[in-house]
Each structure stands twice: as structure tokens, then as C-alpha cells.
Image: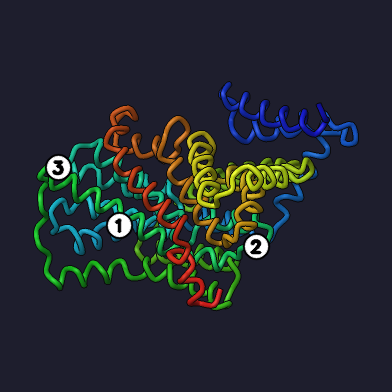
Amino acid sequence: MSIELISIILLFGSFFGLLAYGVPVAYSIGISTTLTILLNIAFLPGITTVSQRMTTGIDSFALLAIPFFVLAGELMNRGGVANRLINLAKSLVGSLPGGLAYVNTLAAMLFGAVSGSAVAAASAIGSVMTERMEDEGYPRPFSAALNITASTTGLLIPPSNVLIVYALASGGAASVASLFIAGYVPGILVGLALMMVAAVISRKQKFQRGERVKIARIWEDFRRAFFALLMLFVIVGGIVYGIFTATEAAAVAVLYALVLGFAYRTITFKDLPSILLGSAKTTAVVMFLICTSMAMSWLFSFEGIPQLMTDFLLNTVSSPFLIFLLINLTLLIVGTFMDMTPAVLIFTPIFLPVVVSLGMDPVHFGIIMVLNLCIGLCTPPVGTILFVGAGVAKVSVSKVIKPLVPFLAAMVAVLFLITYFEHITLWLPRLFGL
């Protein structure tokens, strides 16, 4: 048995073993990477090598966008934006049968897009909508399941930190601007699919119809939410038209969110220390995950794992349809036990060469990968959004699983739709010449 094969077995064996034992993902990645490098005599100082790769892995100007977008999301979360978006959504769709289900979905999409955080969306929207929906006869497990799945749309609709991470992992094959524009249509499709499922359940359960709202009220709610929505156009438009880079856009988002919070009088100078501390903690977790994942990605290249995977799939499976199916199934399984950021950094170098060799655009694959992992965030055993949404709704995870299934099925249906029909994802970036 060659040293390369032993290294691969040790790498994956120790990684999955540590995960199964309950070791946090970032530590599992770092330990398994160090053990594998130590196995190679030429790289005996494993700890030094891993440290160097962790440091150089985050030495990227593009990654500076992440702490800024995290801070902007925290400011939006504390700044009263959620209530304004919920009121706007209720004015637009609340009068339909089962209207609060649509309000939950639309508000989560809007807040997720503005904040760039699925966790923030699940927390902010769930904490408000669960009580409102329960007062009108909606079961808490149903409200939680809808909020959990709808919150992930903000990871597809820009600005999205995970799309920035994928742009880095792709080695420049996909730009942040093209990924941002490409995420709109799939993100909206996921939201519409969730609304369709909610509509069927609402009619079956005969949930209440909200009262019809006058045009004047819709205009008033739109006016109150206008500047929060305007942030999307300022940030994404500035990137697409080359006014500023993604990192500069993130800094603009922080300034915009801060001014908005003071203008709405929902943030004071006394709130700033706790906001900065909260965003610093979140950034530290994300950046540590990126550090260790970049070290493992480098090891993949050193061991030739991407080339081995490409050769294996192309030589054993003749149909591109089946290869894409296998990759989707693999990512769906990966998403159930691994956080999104390390999953993107680890599996992009493995699967991107395969799909590119079959003619798939790197931007298209990036959206497919993110949607796969969004589904994983909603599933046990490690689904972050699942636990946040259930906690906010004050229901046990076991009670959420059953109502969650039809919503997950809708997300999977959209996943396979965008996988095999690339124009759904790519027509908008091509329209902008990206």
C-alpha cells in the first residue's frame, strides 16, 4: 500500500472518527490534517506546516468582507429591521389564506438577504412570527419548520458570506459579483417553493386568512422598510457595476446599517460594545473554521485527491447526469454533519475539477453547492438553523422534524431543477455580462 493511499485513509478516517466522537468540526479538521502531514517524512514538522497553511489560507483581501458583513448583520438584527420587514410582508401577502405562513417566508427571505445571515434571520423572524402565528391558530412546530427552511434563502440571495468563501475556494474561477447575481433566482425559487408547500398545508388545515390591507397601509409599511431594502441595491449594485469591491461593499454595509440603527433610534452608543463583541465572537468562529479548512484543502492538493476523484468519476461513471446526481447526494449527506464554511472550503477543490471537466460553469456549481449545504443546515444531527429555529420557537427538535419534511422536499426539488437546467442560475449573470 502506497504512502499516498495510507495518507488519504488516515486523513478521512481520523476526521470522521473525531466528528463521530463529538469533537468540534474545526478541531477535527486541524487534528486530522496535522496527523496526515506528520505521516509524510518530507513534512515531519506537521504543526509548523499546518500553522503556516492556516495563516496563508486567510491572507486574502476578499475575506475581510466576512467580519464586516457579520457586523452589518448584527447591527441590522439589533436595529429593528426585522419588525419593519415583517410588517411590509404582512401588508403584501397577509390577506391570503394562510397568510402568516407567507409572511414568515417572505420576511425571512428579506431579512436574510439584508443581514446575510441565516442564523440572524431564524432568530429575528422566528422570535416575532412564532407568537403571532400561534395566536391565529398555527401550530408552533409548523411555524418553526417554515422559519427554519425560509431563513436559509438569505445564504443564496446576496450579500452572502458563504458565496464569498466559495469564490475564494474556487481559486478565482468564480467572481463574487457573478455569484451574487446568480444567487437571486435560485433563492427566490426556494422561497416560492416553500410558499407553495405552505399554501397546500394552510388550505388543508384551514388556517385563518388575514384582514385585507388598504393601499395606504401597504405604502406606509413600504416607506418604513424602504431604507432597509435599499441596502440590497446599494451593496450588490455597487459590486456589479464596479463602484467598489466586495470587501469595500461590506464596509459600506456596516456604515449604512449603523446610520440606519441611529436613524431608527433602535441603537444607541451604549449598545455598540455588545454589538461589536457579538460580531467579534461570530467572526472568530468563522475565521478559525476557514483557517483549518484551508490547511486541509492544501493537503488535498498535495495528496492529489481532486485529480484522483476526477479520474475515478469520469472513468467509472459515463453519464454526466449520474455524476451530478452522485455529487448532489454526497453534498446532501455532508451537509447533515458539517458546517457550511468548512464544507465549501474542503469539497470545492474535490468536486469543482470534476464538474468543470463536464462543462459545468463554476458559478453554477457554486450555487448548487450552497443550496445543498443550506438543506443540511436544516437537518439533524448538526443542523445549526434547525436548533436555532426550534430554540426560538420553544419546541423540541423531534416535534419539528415531521412538519419539516415537506419543506425539505421542496428545497430538494429546486436543487435538482437548478442542477440540470443551468440557465435558471446563469441567465441573470450573463445578462449583466458577468
Return the residue found at the far right.
42
Distance, label 1 to label 3, CA atoms, is 25 Å
Residue 269 visible to an observer of this rendering: no
| Mark 2 closeness class: few <14, some 14–19, many ≥20 residues within 10 Å | some
Q: Which mark is residue 327?
A: none
Nearer to us: label 3 or label 2: 2
Closer to the chain start, of discs 1 and 3, is 3
- Quarter location, residue 327: top right
Of the pair 351 and 245, the residue shown nearer to us = 351
Q: Which residue is mark 2?
A: 173
Q: Which residue is mark 3?
A: 135
| Mark 1 closeness class: few <14, some 14–19, many ≥20 residues within 10 Å | some
Return the residue found at the far front.
318
The amino acid marked with disc number 3 is: Asp
Q: Which residue is mark 1?
A: 192
Where is residue 377 drawn, in percent x and y? 45, 41
Where is residue 413 drawn, in percent x and y? 36, 49
Residue drawn at point x = 58 percent, y = 30 percent? 24
The amino acid marked with disc number 2 is: Ala
- Quadrant of the image for the C terminus? bottom right
Nearer to us: label 1 or label 3: 1
Dot 2: element = loop
Residue drawn at point x = 60 percent, y = 70 percent? 245
